[in-house]
Image: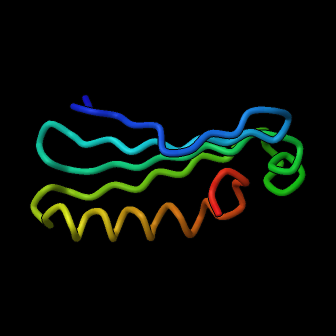
Amino acid sequence: MASHVTEIARQDGAESCSMHLALEHDGGIKMDAQDIGPTVTQIWGDDDYEILGACAACFGVQTCLRIVAREVLESVRRCRCVS
């Protein structure tokens, strides 16, 4: 269970997306995003596209943030709430 979850971005509507950052009790970091809408259905054949990036606390906070952000943001650039 996450100790603290923050919504980083959100866009509502026919083409919607959201992104969250979770700081875990053990010091790990998780970032997730979801993209929903007709474009996702057209590209993936499903109505939603979910992405999760995670990093264990043993790597340290700065390293985790870099790993998770790169992992998730590269995949989420299609989401119009992230530039």
Which residue does the image show at 67% across and 42% down from the upper left?
17
Spot occupied by residue 61 in the image (x, y as percentages of width and height): 18, 61
Spot occupied by residue 49 in the image (x, y as percentages of width and height): 67, 47
Location of residue 70 (image quadrant) = bottom left
Spot occupied by residue 27 in the image (x, y as percentages of width and height): 14, 47
- In this rendering, the count of numbered labels is 0
Left or right: 43 in relation to 57: right
Which residue does the image show at 21% across and 31% down from the upper left?
3
Looking at the rendered image, the quarter that the N terminus falls into is top left
Spot occupied by residue 68 in the image (x, y as percentages of width and height): 37, 62
Looking at the rendered image, the quarter that the C terminus falls into is bottom right
Which residue does the image show at 83% across and 48% down from the upper left?
45
Which residue does the image show at 11% across and 42% down from the upper left?
26
Left or right: 19 in relation to 3: right
In front here: 25 or 6?
6
Location of residue 48 (image quadrant) = top right
Coloring scheme used? rainbow
Q: Does residue 56 sit above or below 71 in this rendering?
A: above
